[in-house]
Image (cartoon, coloured by chain):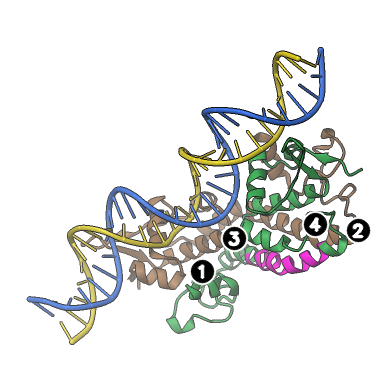
Chain colours: A green, B brown, C blue, D yellow
Amino acid sequence: MDELLSVGEVSRRTGVAASALHYYESIGLIQSQRTSGNQRRYPRHMIRRISLISVAKHLGIPLADVDDALRDVPMNRPPTEDDWRRASTRWKAQLEARRAELERLENALVGCIGCGCLSMKACSLVNPHDALAATGPGPHRLLGDAAAGEATRR
Amino acid sequence: MDELLSVGEVSRRTGVAASALHYYESIGLIQSQRTSGNQRRYPRHMIRRISLISVAKHLGIPLADVDDALRDVPMNRPPTEDDWRRASTRWKAQLEARRAELERLENALVGCIGCGCLSMKACSLVNPHDALAATGPGPHRLLGDAAAGEATRR
DNA sequence: GTAGAACCTCAAGTTGACTTGAGGTCAATG
DNA sequence: CATTGACCTCAAGTCAACTTGAGGTTCTAC
């Protein structure tokens, strides 16, 4: 029932390279049990965690963010529904922001840019809060708040 | 009217570091004119291109993809609306796919996982086409088609 | 016409996310 | 019980996307 999977098996099932699994383990993103002979054995529930990591990575989300999001999801036992729910609420805002930004990019390409406001001056998508308006006229940003914060922080 | 901007000015306006602009130029993602003294001068319309690059990068989209998407957007003259439209249709599918995948991830976290189908066995979000069903029972993938292709290709 | 800020090139360093390889061990099968 | 494939560790290499630094030039403002 709680059969354990070898690294190769997990790799096959998740599409994540064994070397990547080693790496994830080295940075504490996943964990494994060991056989008496020191070989990794993964409980089934790790598959889900690894799958999520894989999707996130495929989306270009840094592993540090993933680590942060999954911090409270336990690895020593199968996570409960509540464990996942807690993690999801933590992560959802980030994902939502990212999705919104993607939408803004799509809009900037096909909507805003395609619609005639090529100069970007009046477009609300470009300058949501006019945070940089003081810098003078001209196009300023497509980026959302998070990005704007980042840009000014450095 | 077609005043040219120095690298520092562009950096300030886009939030992209001057060194990054140098780098983008070195890989052909952007171009600049030069003064008699060999300093970079950017036409205004480059700001938009650089802003798009910046947003894309912030979303974790590889520069190679961005380069591909912007390949047909001219740099030696202000792109026309049609130039942008062509680029946008090329890019839109990719962005759409990415957004869809993000949505799948969100759903996998708050919807699917939160809704009780924790075992991932029956969830349509997880195994959209049952492409890997032959590999045996158990959870297989959250990834879309593109990712599945990539996973099997290697 | 000169000081200082901004700029130039080029090489090397950095970070994230891995992969590859060497050299050796473990486990399932005939 | 020996072989063969899967696995182990650890160090080094790779690739993208930059940043940093050295050493020198240009621009702008007084």
Left or right, B119 with respect to A63, comes to right
For image coordinates 44% across by 53% down, the residue present is B29
Name which residue type carries label 3: Leu
Residue A89 in magenta stretch: yes
Question: Which residue lies under the disc numbered 2?
Answer: B116
Closer to the camera in the image, A40 or B83: A40
Question: Which residue lies under the disc numbered 1?
Answer: A118
On residue B108, the disc is: 4
For image coordinates 67% across by 59% down, the residue present is A67
- Residue A22: x and y in percent read 65, 44
* Front label number (1 vs 4): 4
Q: Earlier in the sequence, mark 3 or mark 2?
A: 3
Query: Residues in magenta?
Result: A84-101
Question: Which residue lies under the disc numbered 3?
Answer: B59
Mark-to-mark CA distance, 4 and 3: 20 Å
- Residue A105: x and y in percent read 60, 64
Mark-to-mark CA distance, 2 and 4: 11 Å
Above or below residue B5? Residue A34 is above
For residue B134, which quarter of the picture? top right
